[in-house]
Image (cartoon, rainbow, N blue to C red):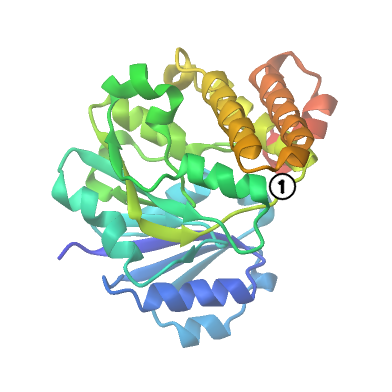
Amino acid sequence: METVDIIIPAYRPGNEFEKLLDSLSTQNYPVEKILVMNTEEKFWNTAWEKKFPKVNVVHLKKADFDHGGTRCQGARLSDSDIMVFMTQDAVPADRNLIGNLIRPLQENSKVGASYARQLAREDCAYLEKYTRRFNYPETSSIKWEKDTDTYGIKTYFCSNVCAAYKKSIYEEIGGFVKKAIFNEDMIYAGTMAKRGYGIAYAADACVIHSHNYSCRQQFHRNFDLGVSQADHPEIFEGVPSEGEGLRLVKKSLAYLIKTGHIWLVPKLAGQSGFKYMGYFLGKRYKMLPKKVILFCTMNREYWKNE
């Protein structure tokens, strides 16, 4: 049986985090360690280490957190065959999450990563529920570099909200980028695909995870997304995101009309406009003054040493 470690960056984890630890500790496919990369020790509940013996915590300062670098640090602490990266706000839908998630890695030696299906929370907004179904369908798949003509940028889609990686391939590729404002999972997946490895989507491995982002939050998030793509043309040049974004808008509009939710069309237009505006500026961030960048970004800490 291949060994599995789980690595979770955390910041101010609350009651929901305890539910996550409990669920991971009782999975049908057992995990070796749950490595928590916790930002700011003062926000950590030490009782969790006693309640969940598999938990190992590493404390970081906020200024030292990085989307790529912190996960690389966690990976160095793992000696398991497979590493599962999660975010603190994702909750397994059942006890089969880990087993179902890693199965594609076990069945095909050329598949280097596998990501889970994300189900919307009960309080999820109507439009966001559709976006979840659009991005995380019911059917599993494996994508390869040759599929870029069919899927475009979606070929490289992989989400560290819940994703598993073969440690041997991870080390061969060189791991996540050491400094990343965002999108470290897709940057790695794109690099991996270009080396001949596949990216699996495991639709039967489910986590409950969604956000009700405001238009302003969508703007900041997509600005950082644009920055990440601008910084890695070796991955994203030639497979632009705009086409996939436009397809989502068209599908969402058709869905709202079909289901009789016409009054949500202005909200769709507003959200889509803010997303595109953020992405557009992020792709061109090198032309912007530092003050404008700091206004647009979701991650101000990232720019302190830039």
- Image position of 276 with respect to 24: above or below: above
Q: Which image quarter is the N terminus in?
A: bottom left
**Can I make out residue 169 in this image?**
yes
Give the residue displayed 30% in from the left and 45% down from the top: 140
Look at 49% across and 46% down and name the residue there: 133
| Residue 306 appears in the rendering | no
Question: For this rendering, which residue is in front, 233 or 267?
Answer: 267
Q: Which residue is drawn at 60% across and 31% down?
A: 254
For residue 164, side relative to residue 7 (left or right): left
Residue 62 image offset from top left, x and y in percent:
67, 54
The secondary structure type at the circle numbered 1 is loop
Q: Where is residue 24 in the image (x, y as percent from the top left)?
A: 40, 72
Q: In which quarter of the image is residue 103?
A: bottom left
Q: Is residue 150 above or below residue 228?
A: above
Q: Quadrant of the C terminus?
A: top right
Residue closest to the eye, 82 or 155: 155
- Considering only vertical position in the picture, is 302 above or below 7? above
Pinpoint residue 134: horizontal percent, then vertical percent: 50, 40
Q: Count every numbered label the image shows and give the total.
A: 1
Picture layout, residue 162 above or below residue 272: below
Pinpoint residue 74: horizontal percent, then vertical percent. Answer: 43, 56
Q: Residue at x 31, y 44 (%)?
A: 113
Amino acid marked by disc 1: Tyr
In this image, 89 relative to 3: left or right? right
Residue denoted by label 1: 213
Q: Residues within 10 Å of mark 1 (few under 14, many from 20)?
A: some
- Residues 196 and 96: in front is 96
